[in-house]
Amino acid sequence: MASTVMSTSHADSFDLRQAVSDKRMRGMWKLATGYRWFFGLSLFFVSIAAVAKMLTYLLLAHTVDGILGAGTFEINTLLLAGAGFVGLALIEGSSSFFAGTIVARSAERITRRVRNFLFDHLQRLNFTFYDKNKTGDLIQRASSDVDAVRRFFSEEIIGVGRILLPFIVNVITLMFLHVGLGLLSLVSVPFLIMIAIYFFSRIEKKYALFQEQDEVLYGMLQENLSGVRVVKAFARQDYEIARYDKENKEKFKRGRTLLLQHALFWPSSDVLAWSQMITCMVVGATMAINGQISVGTYLAFIGLVTQIVWPIRNLGRLIVQASTGLVSYTRLAEIFAYEREPLEDAVFQPKGNVQGAVEFKNVAFSYDGDKNVLEDISFSVEPGKVVALLGSTGSGKTTLVNMLPRFYDYTGGRLTLDGVDLKDYSRSFLRGQIGIVEQEPFLFSRSIRENITYGVGREVSDDEVYAAAKAAALHEVILSFPDGYNTIVGEKGVTLSGGQKQRTALARTLLKNPRILILDDATSSVDPETEGEIREALRNLMQDRTTFIIAHRIQSVMIADLILVMDQGKIVQMGTHDELVLQEGGIYKQIYDLQSRIEDELEKEIASVGLS
């Protein structure tokens, strides 16, 4: 029992990246690592069932010729033959049951391992992978393609065994009964296999196209459900339905073409199979009438031919259906082949926390290795200081801060943290030292407490959670909910207001207690009153931490020790607020004047409304 547990544990820990192969059958073979002997055991039971079936037909021939054909027989002999039929049926049935059960369990275990590995692998891929792949595509591969692989192991493999092993046993038996009849039973076999191989290549291509279109529908569905509030807000339901219907029609067309190939295969194989059966029946009956073979031999011959022709016809079906499993394996292998993001690749491992001194020296970055989206970025910040980044959308602000936790590695120049090249730190260490509060914080569909404690990775006391929530001006709000900290926030925090979600994210970051803080436009999507509350929470969060603020409002960056004005991937201005507002003609001065004018006009309008 212990050895079985150890074997299963080893099988579950198998790295499926080793199963990636250009030769798909070899890849499938590797995918079954740790469970192959189960399939061997299953085939053993299939062999027993095949022999039992063959012996049933031989017993039938003996009963007809040797017992019933003798004219006189003892009842005990007939009962013994009947017991033989029952015994063989029990052996065949139980063997088939064990074979099917073993394969089904093995296939489910392989599938569970594939699902677990795929989920784990997706967690460890870099941001570039997700920049290039759509969420709907990945969900489709993790569901539909994984299930196709499951069917390959649970149905196709054991199906081939159930066809080939009885085929071998029955052909050998027929040859012993009558060589001529044995050869006659094989006439259609090559043609059935040729038809199966022909349709295999055609169906494989059609299925790949069908799966590609299925990806499109998965992607549209995922995107639409995620943005359902936007769709409803702009009353674009009819437009979205029309888009979906168009792609669904394309899937229907591809599915119809795929089914047409199946529909052509079955009649073709049925014509051959029935032609073979009728020919064998006519020839065998003629030989029995002419006395060339006995009636018992004829009955056994027809039974054995049935166990040859129809299974071979089903072999064609399995070959055709196997194409879907192989296509799905290829699609999964494409993901397995992606290199994982190394999290523990440290050259330098600090004993404690970092101080937070950051220096950019002529840093450049390119997503595709062709055109730089950041160029000649140079500045430094002392521990505990605040750096603000201001600029238009697409100017490179978010890309710049994304290099700090090594979501992306810079491609030119040098970036250091506490005097050490950033690439010398492991990604896991850096991400443990850096806290990020995004413009649109993501909350999991769990309790508020679970969301606050998510980034800590250790047991957290209630007092710590309460302290973080209080610092984020969230504690009193949470207590107003019926379930308090156990309130389920809903998907993406839908049950919370924008300000409450933002403060939950702040509390999560406070509890993490990072040395470096990144605030990506953390107050842009809330009302002025909530913004004031969040600013107070941010002051608590920023204290004694090196902080990078991305913002569009001058009011959000005025407190910074250093303001970087960015345009088209370059720093075009640098300094404090007081220094930058004196630079006539600069982008910062233009933004400041524009926002000041808007605020003045707004105040005058409010005042005039109040007077009236």
Image (cartoon, rainbow, N blue to C red):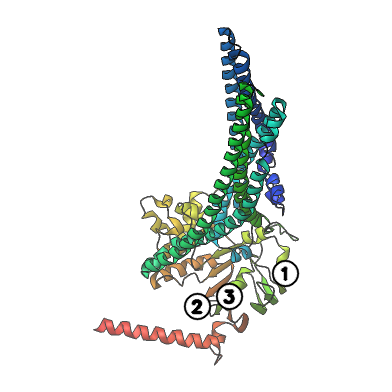
Camera-side mark, 3 or 1: 3
* Rendered image quadrant of residue 398: bottom right
- SS of the residue at dot 2? loop
Give residue 156's quadrant in the image: top right
Image position, residue 219 (x, y; %):
51, 61
Say which of 534 and 6 sits in front. 6
**How many numbered marks does the figure carry?**
3
Q: Residue tagged by mark 3?
A: 397
Real-space CA distance between mark 3 and mark 1, rounded to the nearest whole angstrom: 23 Å
Q: In this view, does 371 lie above or below 445?
A: below
Q: Mark 2 points at which residue?
A: 552
**Residue located 60% across and 66% down the image:** 132
Residue denoted by label 1: 419
Which residue, as the protein is rendered here, is positioned at the far bottom?
Answer: 584
Question: Which amino acid does the dot numbered 2 rest on?
Answer: His
Say which element carries label 3.
helix
The x, y position of residue 550, in whole percent, is: 54, 74
